[in-house]
Image (spheres, grey):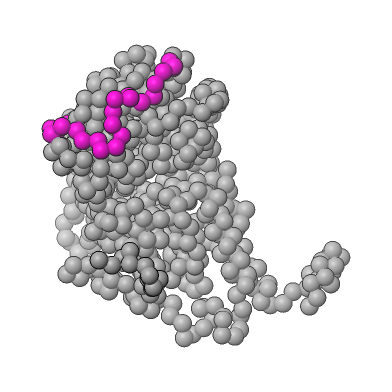
Amino acid sequence: MDEGLKSELSKQGVVATNLQELYNWGRRNSIWPLNFGLACCAIEMIASTMARYDMARFGAEVFRPSPRQADLMIVAGTITKKMAPQVVRLYNQMPEPKYVISMGACAISGGPFKQGYNVLKGIDRYIPVDIYIPGCPPRPEALIDALMALQRKIDAQQLTGDSRPRHLNADEPSEFTVPKFGAHDLEPPQNPVVWHAPLVQIALAEDDDSGTA
Amino acid sequence: MTTLAEAPPKSTLSPSASNGDTQLLEVSMGPQHPSTHGVFRMDVSLDGETVVKLKPIFGYLHRNHEKIAENETYLGSMPYTDRLDYFCSITNNWAYALSVETLAGIVVPERAEYLRVITAELTRLQNHTCLAGFLMQDMGASGTPLMYAFREREKILDLFESLTGARMMCNYMRFGGCRVDLPAGWLEQAKTVVAAFPKFLDEFEALLNGNEILMARTQGVGVLSKELAINAGVTGPMLRASGVNYDLRKVDKYGIYDRFQFRIPLGDHGDVYDRYMIRVLEMRESVKILEQAMRDLPEGLIQDPKTKVRNFKPKPGEAYGRIESPKGELGFYLVSDGTPRPYRFRVRPPSLINLTILEDMCLGRNVADVVIILGSVDIVMGEVDR
């Protein structure tokens, strides 16, 4: 339908839409996050629901204590290797459609604690992440920006076709392996279905001998 | 003050006889639980509703703070201390700076001492308001008290942000002083915030202090005796709520705390209500300190010019610096071997040590009481697990 006609009709009090838009409109405006804080970023997550930042404006203030009722997991803080299996288990318990925001440097990569033996170097090794927010901790505005980015992402999802979201595609996995403690580290150290090691390609120019002895 | 809730008789504290009708139920609270204040887990054994055993399980947020610090320069550990007790980054900075200054014998200029007191007491204000708000949240007062607390907290965070550049992770102290001086107009803004704070406290207290539900839920709940508190090494508002007059600001008089007129509020019963009231009263005392410090703030240097910033190597030796953080006695124990990195770096976290008596306070109570007793301890897992 022509966009101009649609906006003209809406001025007359007539809403023209299709099922997909209605469906996505409903989903994007009632994202219920899981009430789940890990570390410092959790405080900023709480602050963003309070009076000044007020995430309720975006329909996302209903923090559910149970993963069974939540749509969005905000991984807010450092994930230690003791905690990682629990995070994955919580994610598995959430019903589809579900989304993940990786909030802060620690949840992205281990952040300032990356060198620690007990710190997981990013939650995206075990579960798929939709939005990353850098910062230590990110400001509440950054979290709200991430939420709006997630809303745009939901809005753009097609209900049919190859690019349809995971919850409409029976072939896509919705639960992921929960890591276990092995002899030295979590096993598996990452889930190959979700995570691929970043490729680093270093190419030197012909006459550049700076890296060689 | 009358006690509304009676402590249950001793007979309920032991597991019931196995007559086939009753059996103990083991409940795992956490690590994902809305009222455990982070990733903390309690294994609670229940006889009906009554707690007969409680085993705290830590370590879900163990971030190798001490080990990282031993491979880091002295100054390089300063931002890490922000993330210990992430509500009160400035008091953490101060405790660490104080122990390094003790180790290296650094003198702090007058103005820097005042700036430290001002920022630390502002930190105490925002920590205690949030604690009171979270305690009410745990009790089921969902929203309002916490919203009011965060409204005040944001005003203080605005001050921190304009001073240090960060809302939460301030990284403000340096060895021998502070990192930056006050920006123009900061003091006036801070005075306005502090002057308005007692009005907020009046409102908060009018809402809560005499509230029937609050009194019924907290009075006589989670009683901590004076003897146990002292023996377990409990410090901070927890200890003072049990009636022990021990505040490092008075005992050690670190910094310049001997110049200010303020009193130490003490509790009578050592229950959750007392712990809540102690925090409210301490906020009033902090406002007094702030008013005096901002009135007397002198001009001058904010950093000892003789302290080397780069290649800082204290002489071999050891030092323990401690301050009264909003949670209790926060101490850093450092051993130097003359290299730019500390040989041993040890934190004495008040939250962890205040948490050790959790089982003693919870035995014989209901699960619902466990939640508010834990809330009144004021833990931050970043500091408990480090």
Q: Quadrant of the C terminus of chain A?
A: bottom left
For the point 52% across and 54% down, which residue is it? A143
Q: Is residue B19 left or right of residue B303?
A: left
In the image, residue B81 above or below residue A8: above
For the point 31% across and 65% down, which residue is it? A211
In the image, residue B111 above or below residue B337: above
Q: Residue B64 at x, y = what percent?
A: 24, 51
Q: Is residue A79 left or right of residue B251?
A: right
Whether B15 is among the magenta residues is no
Q: Residue B120 at x, y = what percent?
A: 38, 29
Residue B335 visible in this rendered orientation of the protein: no
In the image, residue A43 above or below residue B306: below
Find residue B292 and report its image quarter.
top left
Whether B315 is among the magenta residues is yes
Q: Residue B175 at x, y = what percent?
A: 30, 31
Residue range (magenta): B297-321
For the point 28% across and 71% down, which residue is it? A189
For the point 37% across and 61% down, which residue is it? A109
In the image, residue A136 above or below residue B197: below
Q: Quadrant of the N terminus of chain A?
A: bottom right
Q: Residue A47 at x, y = what percent?
A: 50, 46
Residue A185 visible in this rendered orientation of the protein: yes
Q: State the residue lying farthest toward the front.
A: A207
Number of marks in the rendered image: 0
Secondary structure mostly seen in magenta is loop
